[in-house]
Image: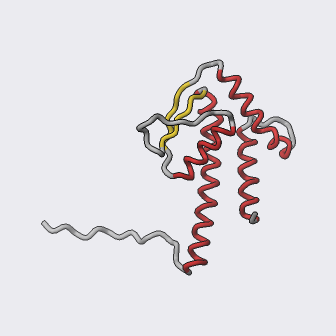
């Protein structure tokens, strides 16, 4: 595993620990207990009602991450026949989704996207010796009247 991947994994562990309702435990111990605390919180909220939510993911990386995070906490991702491949459904307590799951997903997704962008740019630059900057923005040509 590369040092970049190790740093990414450590960041993701810290994000999970942060969303697990951190207490006074040391950072290492908190990260180890994070998943259990999140699952306990989810179980507490299940008795207060569950809603069905539809997520539409813009890319397969986000979709994979979303489903993996759901499964990590014991939630079952699904979709109805006829729904797009990019659609992911879940039934869970609204408070859990709003206060724990979605904020954690967004933070992890941002870190993962940043990592994938950096890796993609580095590989393109090394393999193709090519410029990876964005395309220039030009004014549109005047229209004929």
Q: Residue at x 74, y 65 (%)?
A: 2
Q: Residue at x 81, y 38 (%)?
A: 33
Task: Give the image location of residue 59, x and y in percent.
Answer: 51, 52
Which residue in the rendered view is the most extreme toward the front?
A: 81
Q: Nearer the viewer, residue 109 or 83?
A: 83
Task: Give the image location of residue 113, x and y in percent.
Answer: 59, 56
Q: Answer with left or right where residue 145 lies relative to residue 23.
A: left
In the image, residue 8 sits, relative to residue 121, either above or below, namely above
Task: Give the image location of residue 71, x and y in percent.
Answer: 65, 38
For the N terminus, the image quarter is bottom right
Q: Nearer the viewer, residue 17 or 57?
A: 57
Q: Quadrant of residue 118?
A: bottom right
Task: Give the image location of residue 86, x and y in percent.
Answer: 48, 45
What colour scheme governs how the chains and residues are painted in the rendered image of this protein?
secondary structure
Q: Nearer the viewer, residue 118 or 60?
A: 60
**Figure disc tally:** 0
In the image, residue 29 sits, relative to residue 3, either above or below, namely above
Q: Residue at x 65, y 42 (%)?
A: 69
Which residue in the rendered view is the most extreme toward the left?
A: 145
For the C terminus, the image quarter is bottom left
């Amino acid at each position: 595993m590369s040092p970049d991947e190790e740093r990414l994994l450590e960041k993701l562990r810290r994000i999970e620990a942060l969303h697990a309702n951190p207490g006074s435990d040391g950072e290492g111990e908190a990260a180890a207990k994070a998943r259990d605390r999140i699952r306990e919180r989810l179980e507490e909220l299940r008795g207060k009602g569950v809603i069905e939510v539809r997520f539409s993911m813009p890319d397969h990386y986000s979709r994979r991450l979303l489903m993996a995070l759901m499964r990590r906490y014991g939630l079952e991702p699904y979709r109805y026949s006829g729904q797009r491949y990019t659609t992911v459904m879940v039934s869970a307590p609204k408070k859990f989704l709003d206060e724990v799951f979605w904020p954690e997903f967004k933070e992890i997704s941002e870190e993962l996207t940043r990592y994938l962008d950096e890796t993609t740019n580095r590989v393109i630059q090394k393999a193709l010796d090519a410029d990876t900057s964005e395309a220039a923005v030009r004014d549109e040509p005047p229209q004929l009247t």
